[in-house]
Image: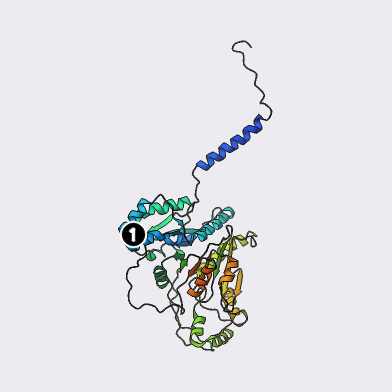
Amino acid sequence: MEPGEPREPREPATGAGTAAAPRWEEAKTFHDNLAPKKKPKSPKPQNAVTIAVSSRALFRMDEEQRIYTEQGVEEYVRYQLEHENEPFSPGPAFPFVKALEAVNRRLRELYPESEDVFDIVLVTNNHAQVGVRLINSINHYDLTIERFCMTGGNSPICYLKAYHTNLYLSADAEKVQEAIDEASPSLPFPWEPSLQPRKLLPSKNLPGIAAATIFSPSRDVAVSQSQLRVAFDGDAVLFSDESERIVKAHGLDRFFEHEKVHENKPLAQGPLKGFLEALGRLQKKFYSKGLRLECPIRTYLVTARSAASSGARALKTLRSWGLETDEALFLAGAPKGPLLEKIRPHIFFDDQMFHVAGAQEMGTVAAHVPYGVAQTPRRTTPTKQTTSAP
């Protein structure tokens, strides 16, 4: 070949092109994994289903709580700063939050422009200095939590309405009671229960915030990674405590008579009715796409009521609200724990600690709703500042 003469293009060796393609794909995958993943845009609070979760509900903070209790807030903050690059371990609400985010991914695939999704807010009375460790933990687990409320030792309850909260979960029973009392006062019961229908006196219908104290199960049980499962008790959770008042005052026989007479009279709403309503609204978005059987949200009514004696009124009440649960389980007073072990919900709500403890023993994350006549008598004097860690 003469100097300056152009070279003939070489044919690639057999298999060279096919070998290069996988190497290119491997390099691209490696680069994509290095690049920061773009998180979805946060919805406007008024358009979303907002779940407010405390830091001790989302993460395990037992050691931090011990330091706060025994050594005070300054040592607690110092410890948090020294360990801010160590992520917290998952707490009882963690699987529930992961399931919410799995539902969000499905919703965004079907409705890319919709803001009708779950929006998770971390609500804590921690000091802002502790926020770095919380942020590091959230990023470590790849959670999509962009809204924080850190109140530096003050109660965060007054901010719940501003965040348009649909559900508040905390490990602090006093804060949960504060939320229930402030936003969802007990419904009046201005007449002695009788077999004759009577008209209730008018009452204020204030917008309520569903709230519950969440507890870790006694043992770990695997839950669904693709379907959010939420189980509700009926009376004093979805419904008012009207029927429980009758049982307490007059016994089961009178209760069965009362429910028979009032079968077609809907029960008043309880504190978590609004949350079930929000879940139902999101379920319908999947139903409208022909995905009822593949819906990633499933709800359960798990009640101590008897089906034949008092079940009809519960189901008719839900129907009158335009709501339903996917499954309705009437236990006639039997323990709920064994059934919940089969359901494996991400969370179960009940107003009685007896049922919460039974669920815990069987590996279920249970949440206590402090509402209704089954609770201990309300305090009549102000309480001191809570001793839980900020």
- Amino acid on which disc 1 is placed: Gly
> Disc 1 on helix, strand or loop?
loop
Residue 188 % position (x, y): 44, 81
Q: Nearer the viewer, residue 213 or 91?
A: 91
Q: Is residue 312 above or below residue 225?
A: below
Residue 19 % position (x, y): 64, 32
Q: Quadrant of the N terminus?
A: top right
Can residue 352 be seen here? The reply is: no
Residue 234 % position (x, y): 54, 75
Q: Quadrant of the C terminus?
A: bottom left
Q: Is residue 151 above or below residue 340?
A: above
Query: Hey, which quadrant is residue 164 in on the image?
Result: bottom left
Can residue 354 be seen here? The reply is: yes
What sort of colour scheme is used for the picture?
Answer: rainbow
From this viewpoint, which residue is outermost toward the top?
2
Q: How many neighbours does mark 1 have within 10 angstroms: few (below 14), some (14-19), or many (20 or more)?
A: some
Residue 335 % position (x, y): 56, 75
Query: Hey, which quadrant is residue 343 in on the image?
Result: bottom right
Query: Hey, which quadrant is residue 108 in on the image?
Result: bottom right
Q: Nearer the viewer, residue 151 or 87?
A: 87
**Location of mark 1 (residue):** 152
Q: Residue at x 49, y 49 (%)?
A: 39
Q: Residue at x 33, y 63 (%)?
A: 70
Number of numbered discs on residues: 1
From this viewpoint, which residue is outermost toward the right?
14
In the picture, measured across the screen, residue 232 lies left or right of residue 161, that is right
